[in-house]
Amino acid sequence: MIHKCEGLRAVVLGCAFLAGSVSAGAQEVVLSAGTESNEDGLYYKTLVLIDEHLREKTGGKVGFEIYPNQQLGNELSMIEGLRSGSLDVAVAGGGNFASFVPSFQIFSVPYILKDYETYRAAMAPDSQVWLLMQQKVADAELGLQLAAPTTVGSRWFANTRSEVRTPADIKALGVRMRVQANPIEAEVWGTYGAIPVNMPMPEVVAAMRQGVVEAVENAPDILYTYKVQESAKYMARTDHSFYVAVVLIGDAALEKVPEDLRPAVKEAFIVGGQALLDASVEAQEKAIKALKADGAIISEVDKAAFREPLGPLYEKVAKEAEAEDILAAIQAL
């Protein structure tokens, strides 16, 4: 992995170009890859794994320069960067990516994937769910491709005030809650009684300290990465989402890769993404232990109570988001 250059976004992108020029003798193509995650996060680890497989499968001719910590912007701006060609590769949560491909809203409905085994089967490279996801992205003609799955694990609810075991507890708290840029997420958590507020995840802890929000939902790995437990120590093990996130590559980026290397590059993305999914279970358990050691209070919840109000939402979202085929493929797993 090439060393990262520092500075403002424009300077960072310039550094990536220069790094590619300098190293062209040994490495023909350097792809800039961005993530909101810091270097301890699973999104960053996804890019590291893909980079390792890229170098192995291309004989060192193709690799990443990775920019963590929003150095190239938040997820929404990085997706725009892929489209314009100013960025080559980015990791995005499915909830945010649904702003570009509405069919992905189906994954924001809690418990759409009932357990890890179902999630893992859905994200296999030959599964009908994954193939439909790739086709939806292609049909959207965004100038980018769905290259690999990734995840942050199963997601929980955390807040600054007290323990939560049922949706009624959330309603009683009346908390302002950070959600992703996705109307379904806002609808779901509004149904549970929270007041949804859209903002990038890296801003959450500061927003909690300022009283802008009092709750958030995310995976233990992300909660620990951002030290959410320092502000919101009450965490409910809702497991409401085995999170669908994606690695995207711009069409312009693939054009940089010599044609004879493109099959190997695509394979590296697939293999790296699958390796991350396998590693995510252990990473989540490690994060849970770290949260507990740092004072988090973790409560078990009545999952049936969380599922109960969502029954009509699956078909409704599938129809509105034109994701009925994806829903059928999930239900067939």
Image (cartoon, rainbow, N blue to C red):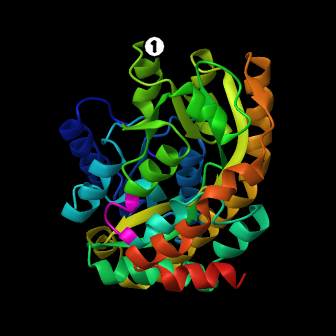
Residue of label 1: 209
Q: Residue at x 42, y 73 (%)?
A: 103
Q: Position of residue 148 (x, y in %)?
A: 53, 68
Is residue 283 within the magenta segment?
no
* Extent of the magenta region: 97-102
Looking at the picture, tell me which residue is in the foreground, 68 or 197: 197
Q: Does 133 appear above or below 115?
A: below
Q: Residue at x 44, y 52 (%)?
A: 187
Q: Position of residue 50 (x, y in %)?
A: 56, 60
Q: Residue at x 52, y 39 (%)?
A: 193
Q: Does 10 appear above or below 62?
A: above
Q: Amino acid at mark 1?
A: Arg
Residue 59 visible in image: no
Q: Main secondary structure of the magenta part?
A: loop
Looking at the picture, tell me which residue is in the foreground, 107 or 284: 107
Q: Look at the numbered disc 1 and give the secondary structure of its residue.
A: helix
| Count of numbered badges drawn on the protein | 1
Does 151 sit left or right of 84 as displayed? right
Q: Residue at x 60, y 66 (%)?
A: 56
